[in-house]
Image (cartoon, helix red, strand yellow):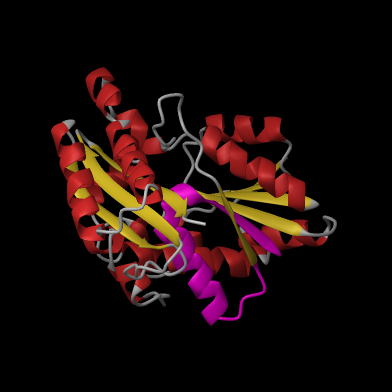
């Protein structure tokens, strides 16, 4: 595994590597969920590139950016064990050589303004901008993302479609702990008591999915009930929504492919999760 921080060196290295290239963009602090994405990339490509970049443009609070764990050496050891080809970890000045405030930005209207986008203004502009830049730098044929960040996945798919980027976007199912909690770097912020409460978010999503499969279609009432379940478990709900899985539009009675999205605060952590529901 070769580690690279410079774009020109990255491009030179890629020219020497064979076949189809898959990119796995990350912010580091890797866990089993990330490694599952890496393994999927290895299945579909000849060359696997993993990027690690803590992107300041997608943080709405400076203290969150400063607190985000940087574990480059540990991450590199994990990726080397997975047999990836290139680890790209550029410094901020490589990605944003001038002021971030005057940097060109990529925006996906509509999808970026709801749920996590409403709670964290500008977040998905930061996500779309950095992913667009990484695609231009690496020029992969495929890119692999986790479905835990379902809204992010749809934002990236819309960006790729609208800008006619020749990149196949692959979503990989959420990797969970044994009690259902979605794996996330932010779980490290939980103390023992909070960690015991955290699976309540997934439990509320699962209860709602089961209820939909049983035939209920009073979506607003189901959202209210799930929100109450989360609050009663000691979490502070941010949002809970039932939406159409293809575009996050409000569902209609005949829609069959739905997704339940939820986010809640617990101590210093903001937990997000989702559950797709196929009504057949």
> In the rendered image of this protein, does residue 256 appear above or below residue 53?
below
Query: Which is more toward the observer, 9 or 54?
Result: 54
Which residue corresponds to the image point at 21% horizontal and 59% vertical from the top-left? Answer: 220
Query: Which is more toward the observer, 146 or 72?
Result: 146
Q: x%, y% of residue 236?
A: 16, 41
Task: Please check the rendered image and state whether residue 40 is part of the magenta-colored stretch, yes or no.
Answer: no
Which residue corresponds to the image point at 18% horizontal and 36% vertical from the top-left? Answer: 235
221 left or right, relative to 78: left
22 left or right, relative to 175: right
How many marks do you count on the picture?
0
Q: Quadrant of the N terminus?
A: top right
Judged from this view, the residue extending furthest toward the front is: 215
125 left or right, relative to 4: left
Chain part drawn in magenta? 141-167
Residue 54 visible somewhere in the drawing: no
> In the rendered image of this protein, does residue 82 appear above or below residue 90?
above
Query: Which is more toward the observer, 222 or 6?
Result: 222
Q: x%, y% of residue 130?
A: 47, 64
Residue 114 visible somewhere in the drawing: yes
178 left or right, relative to 84: left
Query: Residue 271 occupies which quadrant of the picture?
Result: top left
Q: x%, y% of residue 244?
A: 40, 65
Query: Which is more toward the observer, 182 or 270?
Result: 182
Q: x%, y% of residue 120?
A: 25, 59
Which residue corresponds to the image point at 55% horizontal and 40% vertical from the top-left? Answer: 34
Task: Please check the rendered image and state whether residue 147 is part of the magenta-colored stretch, yes or no.
Answer: yes
Which residue corresponds to the image point at 43% horizontal and 38% vertical from the top-left? Answer: 70
């Amino acid at each position: 595994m070769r580690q690279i921080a410079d774009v020109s060196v990255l491009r030179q290295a890629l020219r020497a590597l064979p076949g189809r290239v898959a990119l796995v963009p990350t912010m580091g602090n890797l866990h089993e969920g990330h490694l599952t994405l890496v393994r999927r990339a290895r299945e579909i490509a000849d060359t696997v590139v993993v990027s690690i970049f803590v992107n300041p443009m997608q943080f709405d609070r400076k203290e969150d950016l400063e607190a985000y764990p940087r574990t480059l050496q540990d991450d590199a050891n994990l990726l080397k064990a997975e047999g990836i080809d290139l680890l790209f970890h550029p410094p901020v000045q490589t990605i944003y050589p001038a002021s971030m405030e005057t940097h060109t930005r990529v925006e996906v209207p509509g999808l970026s303004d709801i749920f996590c986008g409403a709670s964290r203004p500008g977040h998905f502009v930061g996500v779309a901008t950095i992913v667009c830049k990484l695609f231009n730098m690496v020029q992969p044929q495929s890119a692999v993302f986790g479905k835990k960040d379902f809204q992010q996945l749809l934002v990236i798919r819309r960006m790729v479609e609208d800008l006619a980027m020749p990149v196949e976007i692959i979503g990989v199912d959420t990797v969970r702990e044994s009690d259902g909690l979605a794996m996330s770097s932010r779980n490290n912020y939980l103390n023992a008591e909070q960690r015991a409460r955290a699976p309540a978010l997934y439990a509320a999503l699962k209860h709602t999915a089961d209820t939909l499969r049983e035939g209920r279609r009073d979506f607003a009432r189901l959202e209210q009930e799930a929100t109450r379940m989360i609050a009663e478990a000691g979490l502070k709900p941010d949002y809970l929504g039932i939406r159409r899985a293809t575009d996050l539009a409000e569902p209609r009675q005949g829609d069959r492919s739905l997704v339940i999205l939820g986010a809640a605060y617990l101590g210093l952590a903001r937990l997000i999760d989702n559950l797709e529901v196929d009504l057949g």
